[in-house]
Amino acid sequence: MCTDSPFFHIGPIREPEHFYGRKAEVGRIMSLLRQSQSVSVAGPRKIGKTSLLMYISNPTVVCQHGLPPERYLFVFVDCEGLGSFQSADLYLYFQHEIASNLGETYTEFLSTSTLDPSTAYLSLVRLVSQMRREGLQLVFMLDEFERLGTNQNLDIDFFGGLRSLAITNQVVFITASKVPLDQLSTRARNNLLGSNFFNIFRVVPLDLFSESDSRDLITSGFRRVEVSLSSEMSDWVLQTGGRHPFFLQVAGDCAYQAVVEARAEPTGLCLDTLMNCFVRQAESHFRYYWEQLTSQERYVLATLPWSQQQERYRPILLRLQNQCLTVRAGDEYRPFSSQFAGFVAAQEVEHLLRAGPLLVDRRRREVLLHGRPLTLAPTYYALLVYLAERPGQPTSLSELDQAVWQPQQSAGAEERVKTGIKELRKALQDDAKLIVSHRGRGYAFDPYA
């Protein structure tokens, strides 16, 4: 039995046999390559952009799609560390990377005599022109392209030079970024704004996997280590990973460690152990997504049962879906995975009060109970909120009377509060147990009841 995990979530996937899904996207990119068309691969962090670039540049994959690999030179550049480079330095760096991949025939382009910043662009043009004359198609892959788009040392002329390489010498650019280049250009202050560079690209967005591709990733991974998962365990991986390529790999690896390394029976695994394994590796990424959201996006995500009913939130709902943080089933939106839903539920959001199965919007004075609207009269809403703000803390009848009814006289306080509690429990129905009586001390809200 294989002892290496068949799931990969540390770094990109480099071997074609470990790459799953994306058939439509790969086919689309290969079709565009045949037309010498530049491509903007767009998708949120950890959706698999780098893995896709490495997959499509593999000679076997290139050949499988009817392209002669000997005629195509794929050059991969990680732009992560290029955010402060000057244009001449970048042109020289690009030239070096291309020539290095070409071998001894092009060593002259690596000599010190050609590494002159004043002629860097002309030298790069000469290199790609020679390649073109020799029948070589350059496919220049720029990963983490945002770092160039937001580099304040670069101007419109720099990106115009890249565009000229594509137009004059048919260089194909494949960029990978969190948003399509036309959107990136509107965010950059002085760089892409006003440049025609992004006009040469066709966008290929990366979204969540389909359910069939997700299950194929799970079952194929375990098949390689000769393990047959129970349907319950396969469902756990799918629900926890949520059709997200990266988080499916994380969940799959947790299941692998439990099943293979711990030699446990798939049906006898402790879900708490699996969840702890997943959370340790996933929570920092969840937090990154959360911190990138605007306050309004956080509110909409945290109040999906409400917000998706409001027309004014439609653009935000679409943005969250494009960021792969939500999925749409019919007319309903929900977080992309059960674990991410739990993470969101644990976050503090302005105007929102969370208490057990309750979610209260103080600003709109509305309540969700287990995600469903709870209709309450104003007095009972105030009574519930006052108790929920003090979870587990017994509150006397007189204090509740003063806080909710604010009577001029205390007469009848006990009866008012008892009637209010009775009506509140009636409204809560099966969750009436959330309101706990403490003999001689009053009432308390128990979020864990």
Image (spheres, rainbow, N blue to C red):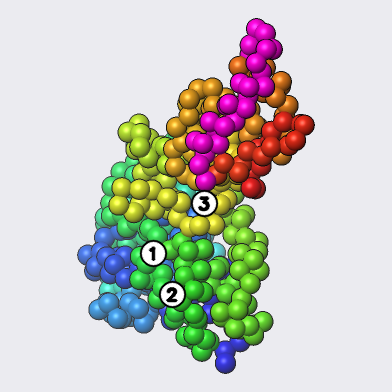
- Look at discs 2 and 3 and give the one toward the viewer: 3
**What secondary structure is found at the residue carrying circle 2?**
helix
Q: Residue at x 32, y 62 (%)?
A: 172
Magenta stretch bounds: 406-430
> In this rendering, is residue 188 above or below 338?
above
- Whole-percent x, y for residue 444 in the image: 69, 35
**What secondary structure is found at the residue carrying circle 3?**
helix
Q: Residues within 10 Å of mark 1 (few under 14, many from 20)?
A: some
Q: Residue at x 35, y 78 (%)?
A: 61
- In this view of the protein, which residue sits in the foreground, 65 or 160? 65
User: Of marks 2 and 1, which one's residue comes earlier in the chain?
Assistant: 1
- The rendered magenta stretch, by its main secondary structure, is classed as helix
Q: Which residue is mark 1?
A: 209
- Whole-percent x, y for residue 200 in the image: 28, 51
Tell which residue pokes out farthest to the bottom in this image. 1
- Whole-percent x, y for residue 323 in the image: 43, 50
Q: Which residue is mark 3?
A: 341
The answer to whether one can see residue 193 in this image is no
Mark 3 vs mark 1, CA separation in Å? 18 Å
Q: Which residue is mark 2?
A: 217
Q: Residue at x 31, y 65 (%)?
A: 25
